[in-house]
Image (cartoon, rainbow, N blue to C red):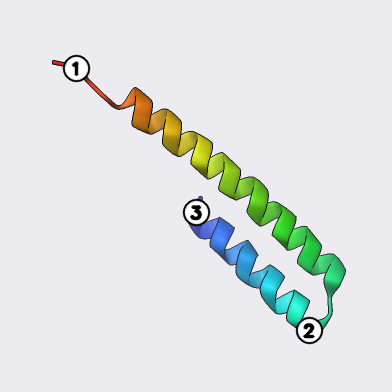
Amino acid sequence: MLRWTLIFLIIALIAGAFGFFGIAAGAAGIAKILFFIFIILFLISFIGGRRSI
């Protein structure tokens, strides 16, 4: 999922550089949402993955 975040971030940067601000805003929004989903899933797996012996 982090890979998709980076892909959409790169798309947003390229589109912004070429002046396609609508596409850049859309790709940046998708990248932001995917990043937050990745962080939440990472924290859940980190906390849930701990086992006390």
Badge 2 marks a residue whose secondary structure is helix
Up-down relation of residue 19 to residue 1 (above or below): below
Residue receiving disc 1: 52
In space, the residues marked 2 and 3 are separated at their CA atoms by 25 Å
* Sequence order check, earlier mark of 1 and 3: 3
Instruction: Identify residue type, mark 3.
Output: Leu
Q: Label 3 near label 1: C-beta < 8 Å?
A: no
Quadrant of residue 7 in the image? bottom right
Residue receiving disc 3: 2
Up-down relation of residue 29 to residue 13 (above or below): above
Badge 3 marks a residue whose secondary structure is helix
What residue lies at 30% left-to-right and 27% top-to-bottom? 49
- Residue 49 vs residue 7: left or right? left
> Closer to us: mark 1 or mark 2?
1
What residue lies at 79% left-to-right and 62% top-to-bottom? 25
Residue receiving disc 2: 18
Q: Position of residue 9 (x, y in %)?
A: 63, 65
Quadrant holding the C terminus: top left
In space, the residues marked 1 and 3 are separated at their CA atoms by 29 Å
